[in-house]
Image (cartoon, rainbow, N blue to C red):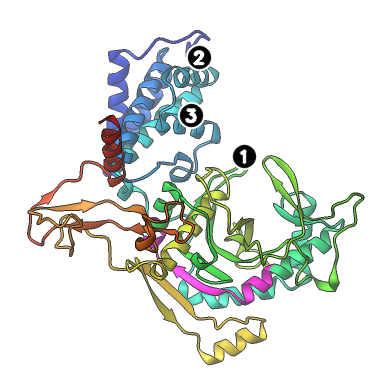
Amino acid sequence: MSGITDLPSPAPTAQDVALAERLVALAGEALSGPTAQVADQLRAHTAHIALLDRQAPVVSAVLSMCRAASEHWQASGFGHFSVARHMPSVAPALSSLLQAAVDGDADAQLHERVRRACTASAEDAHKLIAIGAGVHALLEAGPSRFPAAAATAPIDPRRLPDLRARLISAQQGKPAVNRLALALFENTGTLVPFLNSADDAARVLLAQENNRLAKARLYHVDEEMTEAAIRKAERGRKGPLAPHRVPARRGFIAFGKPLVRTVPDGEEQPADVVAVSWGPWAADFAHAPGQLRPTPVAGPRQPFWRWFGPDGVRHIEAFDGRERPTWWLTFWTRPTHAVPGVPPLMADNETTIGATEAPGPMRIGTTDEISHVVYACWDFITQEQVTKRPITQQRVQPRKPTDLRRDRRKGVEDDSAVHLVTLRGRRSQPSGSAPAAPASSGRTLDYRQVIAEYDRSHCMNPHLHRDDPDKELHHHEEITVIEHVRGPDGAPMRPTKESRTVHQLTAEVATDAG
């Protein structure tokens, strides 16, 4: 027994803080130079603290250190730290508690949650101590310490056309209909046609997905661009999507670094999303075999589709997609086990987004995480259409004529060329002789400084900016300026103490105060 009683525990003492500091120091050593000796010390120290009758104050001290480290993390321009995404193996309950500490919840409320967790189980207290120290170590080390290799191997861009053709073939047979119909019968779908028969609903969904895949333009974004898209997704998109910011009417994008979706309750391991397909969608039965129609219902309105969301079921009425452009996104993962007859990728989930909808803040624990990364990739690829500051470059990998004829026989209508998308140039390193960006202020700098990555609103017609404050005759586009070095070559490097966003907010507060 741990000796914990169900009474309010006191605030951390100096001894509690010292124990917490020793723990996070060991976690930092394990991260920078993992050895068997350090691992044994870390394991023994966490086990020792978990048996103390003051384990809750020690955990509170660890989480307070995590909160301070997260403030330094954000001030360095690294965006929002997600425990669920960066440490997906953590149980949801403990992940929620750690995220509350990182986000800076009220001390009294957090302390009470820690006390309840430690009172309920000494094992949970042990995990909180160890994982909290790990979160602190990662926050202190910065994003460069995160493992670059994911558990799931990314898609080889050279195999992307073959993989797409195999997906189309695999989804045309009866086994695919049976698998999807069984999933729909178990209520695992998100967007489902309003039909009584699960087989008919599966046929509609597969026919529409095959139409999107057959006409999709193939993209492959490398690991560096994927990481930049993740950072942009964490910062959040300010405005709604527009058709001209979608790089292709139908597309299939493979990520150089698989995206870890948060583990839902009941799943044993996270789902690594390796690709996303998209295409126009309307609440109709286009491409449905046999001219299937929705199941008639009594009432003035006939629903065509159903949306099974966290807030219940929502019925969707018919619309054709011309006045209301909407995109359907399908998230693809690799099967956990190689089974004969199973396609190389499995549709993990799906969602839709309308042209007038603003994505809003990213919701952790849902497919919204992956959707925001896709929107960021779209913005990066199409930025060259709205500004003279493109941040990506594309190299087209064409398909051989013999391979293209084979694709045509499998139902592929696209040219099967792979668009390899990378960031324009590489991110500048402070220690290297990186090219300097011109100073926007017009004055001559005698130092160099790393400007953190940021987003800004770009006016598409500056001449109308003052005369049209309501933006009725002109509009703004959101663009991204990636990390770069500002200042002349050869000048000394000045350390960056705060991100551009923090600097701007501080300036605004000072102006308001004046």
Q: Nearer the viewer, residue 54 or 277?
A: 277
Which dot marks residue 97? 3
Q: Position of residue 417 (x, y in %)?
A: 50, 81
Q: Residue at x 53, y 62 (%)?
A: 242
Q: Nearer the viewer, residue 181 or 4?
A: 181
Residue 220 visible in the shown view: yes
Residue 37 visible in the shown view: no
Is 215 included in the stretch rendered in magenta?
yes
Mark 1 or mark 3: name the one nearer the start of the chain.
3
Q: CA distance from mark 1 to mark 2?
A: 29 Å
Q: Nearer the viewer, residue 206 or 329?
A: 329
Q: What kind of residue is marked 1?
A: Asp
Residue 311 appears in which quarter of the rendering?
top right
Please indicate whether residue 416 sits to the left or right of residue 232 in the image.
right
* Residue hosting label 1: 265
How many C-alpha atoms fall within 10 Å of the one at disc 2: few (<14), some, or many (≥20)? few
Is 341 included in the stretch rendered in magenta?
no
Q: What kind of residue is marked 3?
A: Leu
Which dot marks residue 440? none
Q: Residue at x 50, y 42 (%)?
A: 89
The image shows residue 381, relative to residue 130, as above or below, that is below
